[in-house]
Amino acid sequence: MLKLSKFPFKTQKFAPKVSDNKSTSILLQAWFIRQTMAWVYTYTTLWLRVLEKIKNIVREEMNNYWAFETLMPSLSPRELWDKTGRWGGIDVMFHVPAANDKEYWLNSTHEEIVTPLMWEFIKSYKDLPACVYQIQNKFRNEKRAKSWLLRWREFLMKDAYSFHADNEEFERYYEWMKQVYLNVFARLWLAKDTFIAKADWWTFTDKYSHEFQVKLPIWEDIIFLDPETWDCFNKEVAPSFVWTPNIADKELKQKQDIEAIWIIWVEALSKALWVPAEKSTKTMMFEVDGRFIVASVRWDYEINTLKLQKILWAKSIRLASQELVKEKTWAEIGYAWIINLPKNTELYLDDSIDWLTNFETGTNKTWYHSINVNFGRDLEIPERFYDFKEAKLWDKNPTTWNIFEVFKASEVWNIFPLETKFSSAFWLNFLDENNTLKIPLMWCYGIWVSRVMWVVAEYFLDEVWIAWPKNIAPATHYIIVMWDNLYKAILLAQEIEETWWEVIIDDREKIGFWQKASDSDLFWIQNRIVISDNTLELWWYEIRKRWETESKIISFAK
Amino acid sequence: MLKLSKFPFKTQKFAPKVSDNKSTSILLQAWFIRQTMAWVYTYTTLWLRVLEKIKNIVREEMNNYWAFETLMPSLSPRELWDKTGRWGGIDVMFHVPAANDKEYWLNSTHEEIVTPLMWEFIKSYKDLPACVYQIQNKFRNEKRAKSWLLRWREFLMKDAYSFHADNEEFERYYEWMKQVYLNVFARLWLAKDTFIAKADWWTFTDKYSHEFQVKLPIWEDIIFLDPETWDCFNKEVAPSFVWTPNIADKELKQKQDIEAIWIIWVEALSKALWVPAEKSTKTMMFEVDGRFIVASVRWDYEINTLKLQKILWAKSIRLASQELVKEKTWAEIGYAWIINLPKNTELYLDDSIDWLTNFETGTNKTWYHSINVNFGRDLEIPERFYDFKEAKLWDKNPTTWNIFEVFKASEVWNIFPLETKFSSAFWLNFLDENNTLKIPLMWCYGIWVSRVMWVVAEYFLDEVWIAWPKNIAPATHYIIVMWDNLYKAILLAQEIEETWWEVIIDDREKIGFWQKASDSDLFWIQNRIVISDNTLELWWYEIRKRWETESKIISFAK
């Protein structure tokens, strides 16, 4: 029972304008939050109630599937991070100088703390699988705002770490954990618009990892969904297939090398030569683990270096320098292209080029471009084409040939493999059935709890208010007390709170009915009860649910 | 319901030896905690359950008295601390360099965050009193261990801040808040040994502040308690009265100045001259806000500079330098004493000197000491004697003349005035009834939540185990399952958990009964139920409460 007459916070008459995000404006107007500094917030009472409810949903679902809660520290000593070689290697970590020349990190992730913690508990295959989690503040030394809602310096996260004897055991466990996440979604009423997207995370492994994405028009990630199979990909790793055989000419034209002085880039050239985008190519040169690579896509696509890197099984990929391009292709940048390359140059072609006839490309000769280039005649047909283009709207899923649905979404949780990176660094190992010493596999499961709060607020935003689902709203009942009927309101509130319901009593003095009614809308409390001399006849109260335009008089059994 | 077969943690056979603190050894043996680095801990599941219960008790009692929970950030920007001049002034704050040349503090206290937060909410006397609190991690850059249980780098604290129109209003509010604290004590079963001690805190005010101390033989604070009035003082500020008129000689002896070359300090002299400690004096010189002060106590006492500072209403106090002593008293240190001082020297005498006759003091002349000194004859009788000695065992309460009880205790919470230091720095003000702009008074109320956990563990330590009170124990029931009766155990656990009770099911395979029984003792779970083929006859189970040596067979109604 929360009595507003004692409450130290007040609503504002108008929503302050902050960025283009309406839910945040409402949260500020209803004093749920206050900004203490850029990307750092103070939560006031009602927002904290929402937070606690979301935390408890996560906690209950994790506990149900035998993940065990712990609480690791926010500070960690340099020695732990030196063991994995990550000290100084994570830009977003706050470095904290401490007394006695010690150095700490303010953790944004806890692998280096959880792995040695398990050292004394994981000895045998019988101890596996094991999973521990925590709901804890994380810190990130962010340089700039990507979006003020998404990148915080300080935020709450649920991070779980599981330990497994082998991949098969993990896969069974993963199905459990996916169910945990789906249960949490369902209890937050987000299930309908939640998608499990394949994504790439860090560089521990070549395997796909998963992100759980909530479809929301204002958020930052772009999702490609196969509407039939529900295969779902983050744009970063989305496969893509483009099928345009109708662009192929029946007749192969004569190849021409055209001098086009001062027209350096293909965009300008495409216009100058009247070659359509679909018949031009775009070529880039990379240095990949020391190898020199030439890669080309159709002109209207971009090269997705992450996809290219995976094709090449490469640890690192970067654009080749001007000098290296000249050394390897004998051409200036801008004219180094896919024909006339020196022999043994490694050439990778995207499948968007597969069907092209009479297309344009650079000539590998300064100022010269070639048009009406054709495979087989001017250029060797490669052994295979690859898919390393950045997926676009109207692209198809290469597996099903279905056209992708594309939408914006917010990543609220993710699951990714840590393989044995941390377990081997900390000498965590176990004896298997045959008494052989093995290193356990680790997986990591995150939920951005603070971001989930914001997603919920944004997701349930209607025209005017944030319509919280009742199990995560700050309260279930709002009692407006007019004149001196407080005593009766308290009696009623006590009765209501005998279940799991929670009551806010608006007993503010000298505040009129309409102000109280409008605040109850702003907080979005589902059930509204008015106790005034008018509505009060023994145990009768006015009850209204917000989406019903008419008030209802309902009797409370006494 | 927590199933130990899935649990990733294990008890240890023997308690590790850590410091001299038995409860910590048990907590480590039972894997409640693990040390991640010096003074920084990871809490595992069962300890976290205890913590959550203590937090909820604090939360419920605070909420009951209209203090409102918030959550402020851990990081704060330099600008806020520059406003109060505290940036760089708090040694124990971690300084965090951040991106874009920003500087943050990792907060160990939140006055600089809460005061501007209230700025938009406190406008009128009608908005007062107001109180907000949070339960939040605090960070302290500790240089060295005072005690490894008391000084942490990272710990949980409940800190509340209240805002008041005037002292009278505060005093009413304070009685409420004291009640909150007493309620929390009572629910933690500590009420019997909790004492509200007067203490000094920071330098905001000359007023006493209060500490809540739990009597515990191993902890650091020393408490002086009047056994009749229950007036209670931290040693730092304890008043003290010593009544030894029987030491006074009837006959005043001839004063003698004795040359005692190379015997510099009074300790040595006292022995050399056969003067008892009770007839010697100890004199020290201070620089107090620029004034030069000579202060003297009986030889067997120490000067309590905090008490002296309060007597002098001084902002700062420090020992006078050798040069200053020579300039002001014309004597070397060790001979500057209370007789033969230059005129107008400010001399303060402790009341332990009041009844002395024929006593010893320095002569204010190098190598010389005087014995048989007497007031009135050799030394002017001062207008009054003061009390600035450090209180000792057997001293009396000056108000009641009762001999103090003296014991060790742990400070678990405190209340202290912030006056208008922060409200004026942040221009927080309000209009009173007469429309006059005023600055609200602030008070601060702390509970060291993590320390309370440790105090509870230590307080309830018996010969062998930590006997948690059942409302804060990790669970209420422990079901030992032998052979394949797990299904029945789960049914029973579900039935038990329909109330607020919580069950741990020990279903570990290949672990014998005695190991399970001994772990249930180590965790200290009050009710133990054994389900085995022997005890199981339909719905009969063995139930045992730990303090009963005999097991009881009780039937569960089905």
Image: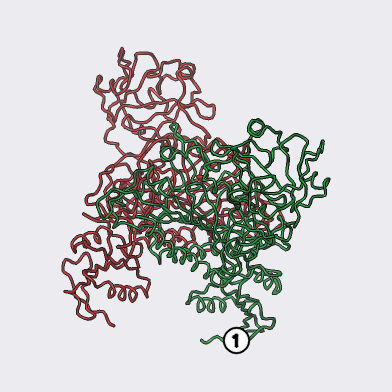
Chain colours: A green, B red
State the image coordinates of residue A325 (x, y, percent, origin top left). 65, 34
Q: Which residue is mark 1?
A: A554
In the image, taking residue B339 as reference, residue A238 lies left or right, namely: right
Look at the picture and state if B395 lies above or below A490: above
Q: At x 59% / y 70%, what residue is drawn? A: A228
In the image, taking residue A22 as reference, residue A276 lies left or right, namely: right
Q: At x 61% / y 48%, what residue is drawn? A: A382
State the image coordinates of residue B91 (x, y, percent, origin top left). 49, 36
The answer to whether residue B225 of the structure is visible from this angle is no
Label 1 crowding class (10 Å Cα cut-off): few <14, some 14-19, many 20+? few
Q: Which structural element holds mark 1?
A: strand
B17 or A192: which is nearer to us? A192
- Chain containing the residue with disc 1: A
The answer to whether residue A221 of the structure is visible from this angle is yes
Residue A17: quarter of image? bottom right
Q: Amino acid at mark 1?
A: Ile
State the image coordinates of residue A523 (x, y, percent, origin top left). 63, 68
